[in-house]
Image: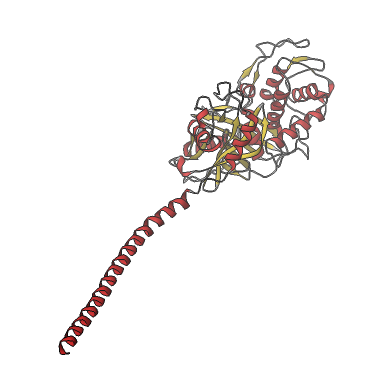
Amino acid sequence: MAMAANVACATVSAAKPSIFSETACVIDAQSGAVLYEKNMNQKEYPASITKIMTTLVALENASLDEEVVYTENAFANWESGASNAGIKVGERINMEESLYAMMLASANEACNGVAEHISGSIDAFVKKMNQKAKELGCKNTHFANTNGLWKKDHYTTAYDMALIGCAAIRNPQFKTIAGTKVFIMSKTNMNKRGKENPILSHHKMLNPADSNYEYEYCEGGKTGYTSKSRNTLVTFAKKGDMELVCALMKCDNSYQVEPNAYTDTTKLFNYCFENYQKIKIGDDTASEINKQYLFTNFSPFYSKETSCLHIDEDAGIVLPKGVSIDKAQKQIQYYDKEVEQDGKKIIGRLSYTYKGQEVGASNIYFDKNDSMTLKDSIDMSQWFVEAVEEASKPPFPWKKVILLVILALCVIPLVIICTIRIRKYKIKTEKRRRFRKNKRRMHKRDQDFYTRRLK
């Protein structure tokens, strides 16, 4: 999916809410449009919301049934009172349960144990985290550990954490883990766990427990706290077709004192859901791309069902409520060379802007389709090159043509009228000339007649 970088959705008429947290950002998970921001590019210490990236990288580099063996390295460099799941040195726990311990119980030892298992060392895994951050478009982020315990060079921003959250929520396994309220870990070689010791999610909008912060549209999230970073919070919420990611950082008040990160998040979600709408663009736009752009000269070979060109299935744009899609400006860009991503060929990008701000985008994918009716003898690679060249040509200058036609329609009648008048004038002039000539001839004849008689 194409994710916009550092963009903001057009401002709605409703007043922007005031929040207690020092920095914040709300992003539409699909389009990447920023619906709210407060100091969103200000660098702060993330604390345990770091574990969103740790979990995402782990899911992308390991299977859930792998067995993690916890060494002494998993318990190194801890702060006093750091969150844990009671895992012991030498204990064997599978990857899936380790990730549940990481996200729900915020287990610091789980982060280190998983990192060492996947990359051989914690430092090597942290490099994967930083590389992933760059791939996602994070420009003000640097991770120095897997769990978020305070380090001077371990920092990020509300916007970058929202980007990371958007990538994470698109992973089905992550979404399941992050949205779980209670998880019971299995017995291991060193711990006879059972139902009497379940792991509970710390996120009180998902799992309110002894608080009143439950939010009906909450899909999950991750909490964070250290004495230097203060409270941090990332939350996922979905209402109708709109799925949002809210990242808050440096909130001084705990949940026992209001306002706090939970009240701020609820306020921001309500504001965005009430004032913005999601408009899907998939079917109509894909059909238009096929017909008017890449396949202008090749459309006889394809139908909508057999076309090998498409965009993201859930592609859509976010606009203020009451604004129709025709108010947004559409731009289609084709790349000189195709890009491989997740096994798909990306040949371009579709984007929409509203009042100068990008409000949604999607990659344009090219997939070879077995249902094509082209003959096998056709060189598809050459055809693809020719198709891209055709699509890269400047559009037909319809406006200039229409202007010239209008001008011609105005000028031609004038030319015809002038031609007719000139012709009439020539005829009239010719008649006068002939009349005068005849008159002179008659006059001369009369003179000759009288002259002869007088003689």
Q: Where residue 448 sits in the image (x, y, percent)?
A: 20, 84
Q: Residue at x 25, y 77 (%)?
A: 436
Q: Where residue 409 sits in the image (x, y, percent)?
A: 37, 55
Colour scheme used in the picture?
Answer: secondary structure
Which residue reaches farthest bottom? 455
Q: Residue at x 34, y 64 (%)?
A: 418
Looking at this view, is 340 or 228 the one in front? 340
How many marks can you see? Answer: 0
Which residue reaches farthest front? 455
Judge from the rendering whether residue 229 lies leftward or rightward of residue 398; answer left or right: right
Place residue 225 in its image quadrant: top right
Judge from the rendering whether residue 262 lies leftward or rightward of residue 337; answer left or right: left
Quarter of the figure that contains the C terminus: bottom left
Figure check: 371 above or below 260: above
Q: Residue at x 48, y 33 (%)?
A: 284
Looking at this view, is 440 or 143 the one in front? 440
Which residue reaches farthest left? 453
Quarter of the figure that contains the N terminus: top right
Q: Residue at x 81, y 29 (%)?
A: 124
Residue 307 showing in the rendered view: yes
Residue 214 showing in the rendered view: no
Q: Where residue 310 sits in the image (x, y, percent)?
A: 56, 30
Judge from the rendering whether residue 395 lies leftward or rightward of residue 94; answer left or right: left
Figure check: 166 above or below 85: below
Looking at this view, is 127 or 408 the one in front? 408
Q: Where residue 390 sits in the image (x, y, percent)?
A: 58, 39
